[in-house]
């Protein structure tokens, strides 16, 4: 069980506004972590198509961070990274997988695409939730910024899902050739 004393700077949450600010700051931490992870993924992947999906999303993620800073500014708050344990865990699992699959670039790239899509799904869920809260609070300017982030996350996820099918076919074909050679 997490103790509040383990989370310096976090306050008890007693209303919708505080819940929303906590969620934005947690997403702010997640986006910052994912920015670093995407840069690592781009460096590790061998597949040029995967690189072309990751590269523009790195720039989009930088904009997502700026949008979240703007949301906090609109709400009269300063950005404060509140550790997003789910983001941290996903990145840790992705790093572990990358090390384990390093000897097979096709499997490594397939795994990276899959992990990146898991990250996108987390972000999509997070933004949808934050948008619903912002709607209840009547924060129209905030909603526009969050929807911009959400749409880019959804587009990246769709691109990754399409690419995963190609990477999966490549990995399967490659394994078939390896199996045939070993006979």
Image: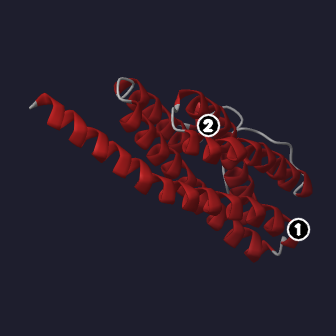
User: Along the horizontal axis of the image, is 12 left or right of 143?
Assistant: left
Q: Nearer the viewer, residue 7 or 115?
A: 115
Q: Give the label, 2 or 1, closer to the camera.
A: 2
Say which element carries label 2.
helix
Task: Kindly identify the residue that appears in the image at 47 percent across and 44 percent down.
Answer: 115
Q: Secondary structure at mark 1?
A: helix
Quarter assignment of residue 146: bottom right
Q: Which residue is label 1 attached to?
A: 141
Residue 111 lies left or right of residue 68; in this view the side is: left
Asked whether residue 49 appears in the rendered view, the answer is: yes
**Is residue 53 shown left or right of residue 118?**
right
Residues under labels 2 and 1: Cα distance? Answer: 28 Å
- What count of labels does the image hold? 2
Residue 64 vs 1, above or below: the answer is below
Residue 126 in view here: no
Single out the residue that lies furthest toward the left. Answer: 183
Q: Residues within 10 Å of mark 1 (few under 14, many from 20)?
A: few
**Residue 168, image x and y in percent?**
36, 50
> Which image quadrant is residue 145 in?
bottom right
Which residue carries the number 2 mark? 38
Choose between 149 and 156: the one closer to the eye: 156
Residue 56 in the image, given as x and y percentages of width and height = 72, 46
The quadrant in which the C terminus is found is top left
Where residue 15 appears, x then y in whole percent?
Answer: 71, 63
Q: Residue at x 22, y 33 (%)?
A: 178
Q: Quadrant of the N terminus?
A: top left
Mark with earlier residue (2, 1) = 2
Residue at figure coordinates x 66%, y 61% from the top left:
127
User: Would residue 119 appear left or right of 25 to someone viewing this image?
Assistant: left
Q: Compare residues 85 and 110 and report the one nearer the observer.
A: 110
């Amino acid at each position: 069980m997490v103790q509040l004393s383990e989370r310096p700077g976090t306050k008890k949450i007693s209303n919708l506004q505080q819940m929303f600010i906590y969620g934005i700051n947690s997403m702010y931490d997640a986006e910052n972590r994912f920015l670093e992870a995407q840069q690592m993924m781009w460096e590790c992947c061998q597949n040029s198509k995967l690189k072309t999906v990751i590269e523009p999303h790195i720039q989009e993620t930088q904009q997502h961070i700026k949008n979240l800073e703007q949301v906090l500014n609109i709400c009269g708050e300063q950005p404060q990274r509140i550790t997003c344990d789910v983001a941290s865990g996903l990145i840790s699992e992705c790093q572990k997988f990358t090390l384990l699959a390093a000897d097979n670039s096709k499997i490594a790239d397939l795994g990276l695409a899959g992990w990146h899509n898991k990250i996108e799904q987390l972000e999509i869920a997070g933004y949808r939730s934050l948008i619903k809260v912002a709607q209840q609070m009547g924060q129209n300017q905030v909603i526009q910024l969050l929807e911009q982030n959400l749409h880019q996350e959804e587009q990246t996820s769709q691109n990754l899902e399409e690419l995963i099918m190609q990477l999966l076919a490549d990995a399967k074909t490659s394994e078939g050739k390896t199996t045939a050679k070993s006979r």
